[in-house]
Image (cartoon, grey):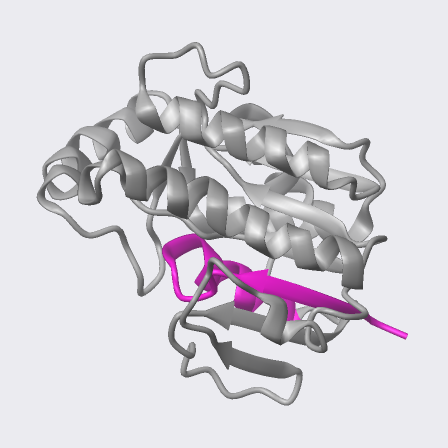
Amino acid sequence: MGQTALLIGATGMVGSQVLDLLLRSPAVDKVITISRRTTGVRHDKLRDIAHADFRDFAALKADLTGIDVCFYCVGVYQGHVSKEAFFEITCDYQKALTDVLSQTSPQATFVLFGASGADPGEKSRATFAQAKGRAETLLHAAGFPKTYIFRPGYIHPTGARSPSGLVYKLAKPVFAFMRRRNPDAVLTDRALARAMVSVGLTTTRASGVIDNRAIKEIAGGAVQT
């Protein structure tokens, strides 16, 4: 019997790559996606749910039952929203999900798409570091038996989806140069997704934080799809 995977944020740059890999994986029998809009993907394995209010998942309890592994890929760029909205999207949305999922599927493995520089102590002056750190603390408090927190650095898009915004467009050539000079500093969205799916489905690794270098190592050893 294959696994049932839950994917939150399947329409984003990394989430869309995770979705593709899950649908290709013979280890997965069913994929449930929850996003603000449907993915547009059609597949026999897929249950694609559009959910408007990420502050409340109570109405989806039936869909959140029997989950083996959850991949959480919700995120927003700090410059696109206010500080309050950034904390809400990064922390409150995640907690709203785990409050329900920890009841309906308490033995689920949880894989979090975090960020390099996350500060669980919230001592950093950077909003993103505080918020990402708080999200990690909230995940630990949820009580899942296996939790994997991925902290990638710069993510280079290779698929159809890529980040929007002028800052990203201006920075993209710089990071392309960095990728040529120091490949370890840059990660592709596909490699990150490959590492997340590999770890989440096998759960042989101890719970913990997985940094950029470890992500590249895992992705390199994972089945190429």
Q: Position of residue 150 (x, y in %)?
A: 57, 35
Relative depth, front residue between 29 and 54: 54
Q: Quadrant of residue 166?
A: top left
Relative depth, front residue between 133 and 200: 133
In the depicted structure, whether residue 28 falls above or below residue 191: below
| Left or right relative to 60: residue 191 | left
Q: Residue at x 64, y 89 (%)?
A: 44
The residue lying furthest to the top in this view is 123
17 is within the stretch colored magenta: yes
Q: Residue at x 79, y 41 (%)?
A: 146
In the depicted structure, whether residue 52 falls above or below residue 128: below
Q: Residue at x 53, y 68 (%)?
A: 20
Q: Quadrant of residue 46?
A: bottom right
20 is within the stretch colored magenta: yes
- Give the residues drawn in magenta, as a range: 1-24
Q: Quadrant of the N terminus?
A: bottom right
| Left or right relative to 112: residue 25 | right
In the depicted structure, whether residue 80 falls above or below residue 39: above
